[in-house]
Amino acid sequence: MPATATLSSKFQISIPKAVREELHWEAGQEFVFIPKGKGVLVMPVPELDELMGIAKGARAEEYRDREDRF
């Protein structure tokens, strides 16, 4: 699936059609950009319903948070 795109003068990049179709990306979908070394990881932001059940079995009490650290 290698493909290239050019950064426009407005700092926009068009995602090649082959990539959009392979990953089922749609117009209006929101993405997150995660810096990785000299590159960037582009991932769609999941919809709330896609996150349902992700923490199944997690304890609601006795969890650690930032306040537990020294």
Image (cartoon, rainbow, N blue to C red):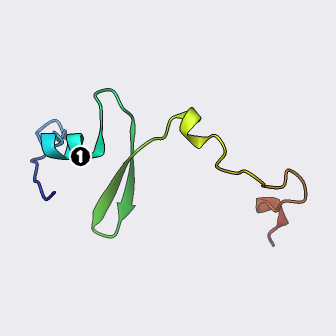
Q: In which quarter of the image is the C terminus?
A: bottom right
Residue 46 percent across, percent down from the top left: 49, 40
Q: What residue type is labelled 1?
A: Glu
Of 22 and 27, nearer the camera is 22
In the picture shown, does residue 38 fall above or below 58? below
Of 10 and 13, nearer the camera is 13
Give left or right: position of 64 versus 1. Answer: right
- Identified at 20% across, 47% down, the residue is 19
Quadrant position of residue 3: bottom left
Give left or right: position of 35 versus 2. Answer: right
Give left or right: position of 40 versus 19. Answer: right
How many dots with numbers? 1
In the current view of this chain or complex, which residue is farthest to the top?
Answer: 28
Residue 24 percent across, percent down from the top left: 29, 39
Give left or right: position of 12 versus 61. Answer: left
Residue 5 percent across, percent down from the top left: 11, 48
In the current view of this chain or complex, which residue is farthest to the right?
Answer: 62
Residue 62 percent across, percent down from the top left: 90, 59
Disc 1 crowd rating (10 Å Cα; few below 14, some 14-19, many 20+) is few
In the picture shown, does residue 12 fall above or below 64? above
Residue assigned mark 1: 22
Of 26 and 57, nearer the camera is 57
- Identified at 80% across, 69% down, the residue is 69
Q: Quadrant of the N terminus?
A: bottom left
- Identified at 13% across, 59% down, the residue is 2
- Identified at 64% across, 49% down, the residue is 54
In the current view of this chain or complex, which residue is farthest to the bottom?
Answer: 70
Q: What element carries label 1?
A: helix
